Amino acid sequence: MKGYLRYVIITLFLLSVIPAVSAIGLAARSMWVKMDYVPNLEFTQTYQIITTSDYTQDYTLYVTGGLGQYITIEPDQFKDIVPGSDPYFTVSLKLPEGLDKEVSPGIHQIRIGVKETVSSSGGKGIGLLTSSEAIIDVRFLYPGKYLTAKLNVKDVEVNKPANFKINVYNGGKEDINSVRAKIEVYDSNGNKVAMAYTEEKSLKSNAEDTLHAQLSTEGLKSGEYKAVATVYYDMKELKTNEAKFKIGSLEIWIIDYTKEVPAGKINPFDIEIESRWNNQIQNVYAIVTIGRRTFQTPSTNIAPWEKKTITGYFDATNMGVGEYDAEIILYFGDNTAKELGKVTITKPEEVMLMPVITPTTTLLVIIIILLVIADIIYLVYSKKHKTYKEELEMLKMQMKTKQRKGK
C-alpha cells in the first residue's frame, strides 16, 4: 500500500507546481485595421506587448498572410523582458504600385502576432507558451463593375406594410450608373403572391448604399413568406439570397395536449401552444375541463412565433376508467382560443419501489468500491508476502539440516 500512497503524493505535487494559465496581450490604436489598396500604399502603427508572466520572458514577433512579405516589424524580438515592462514595437506596411494586377481581388488578411519563446514558469514547474495577434485587412477591387447585394426584411402584422432593404456594394473599379431591384414574394406553398420594386440609384466604385421597397400585405394571410430580389445594374442582373419573413396576427394556436392519464392520482397535463404574433404575448394561461373537473395552468409569456408547452395538474383520483369530454380554453389578453376533444383515463399505474439514488448515495457506493479494491490489493500483497516468508523459512530449515548432516 505504500507504493500507491507514493503515486498519490507525486500526483498532488505535480498539480501544485503547474502555474495558472495567463494569456499574453497586444494593444494598439486599432487591433483590426481595414483599408483599400491604392498604389504605393503605406501604413504604420505602434503596438504594445501586454506582459502577464510573473517571470522574465523572451518574445518573438511574426507575420502570417499572403501579403506578409510587405510587412516590416521593428524590433522583431525581445530578450529577457521583466514582468510589467510592456515593450513597444512598430509595424510598417508598404504595398508597391501594380500589386492589384498580381493578387486576386477581394480581402487579403495579414496577422501580426507575438509569442513567448521561453516558458513563463522560469524553470519552475510546467510552463505554457501563449501568443496573441492583431489583424490588417487590405481590400483589392475587381476589374470593371462588381456588385454584391443582401436582402433584409422584418416580420410584420397582418395588413401592415412590409419594408424591404437591399444593401448593395460596388466592389469594382468602375462606377455603376444605375442599380434597382424587383422583389417577388412567395407563400409557404411556393405560389407567387406579391411583387414590389425599389427606387433607382447610381453607385460609385468602392461605395455602398441601400435600396428600399414597401409591400402592402392586405389580403395576405398570417404565416411564413419568402422574398427573392433580383437586382439590375447597367444591363446586368444579380439574384440575391432569399429572405424569409412572417405576417402575423394576434393568435395562439393549441397544437396538442395530453390525451391519456392514469386514474387514482394527480397527473401533469401538458398543452402545446404556438404564437402567431410578431410580439411577445404576456399572461397566457389555460382553463381545462375534463368531465366535471376543472383546473387552471399557471400563466406564462410567449415569445413571437414561439412554440411552448404549458403544464397544469389534473386530479384523477376517484375517477373511473374511460373516455371523457375535454375542453381547453386558452386566455391571452382579451382573446381566447378553444379546443374540444377527448381525454382517456386509464387503469392506475402499478407502483414499483425503486431505490432512490442521491449524490450522497453515489459517493458512498464509490467509496465502498474503492475500499473493496484496496482490500483486495492488500490481501493479494499480504498473501504474496506471506508465501515469500514461508519459502524463506523453509529454505533456512533445509540449510540447517544440511549443515547438521555435514557435521
Image: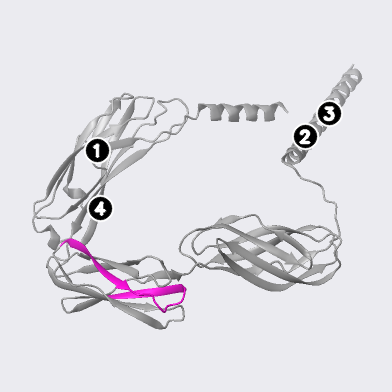
Viewer-proximal residue among 290 and 171:
290
Identify the residue shown where x is 32% and y is 68%.
163
* Residue labelled with disc 1: 28
* Residue labelled with disc 4: 109
Indicate yes or no whether the magenta region holds residue 229. yes
* Residue labelled with disc 2: 371
Of pointers 1 and 4, the one earlier in the residue sequence: 1
In which quadrant of the rendered image does the N terminus lie?
A: top right
Work out how far the residue at label 4 is from the one at label 2, CA to CA, in angstroms: 59 Å
| Region rendered in magenta | 206-230
Indicate yes or no whether the magenta region holds residue 170. no
Work out how far the residue at label 3 is from the one at label 4, CA to CA, in angstroms: 73 Å
Of pointers 2 and 1, the one earlier in the residue sequence: 1
- Which x, y percent locates residue 364? 76, 37
221 vs 314, left or right, is: left
In the rendered view, would you say 308 is above or below 188? above
State the residue lying farthest toward the bottom.
Answer: 191
State the residue lying farthest toward the top.
Answer: 407
Three-letter residue code for mark 4: Gln
Mark 4: few/some/many CA within 10 Å (<14, 14-19, 20+)? some
* Residue labelled with disc 3: 386
Work out how far the residue at label 2 is from the one at label 1, CA to CA, in angstroms: 58 Å
Disc 3, disc 1: CB below 8 Å?
no
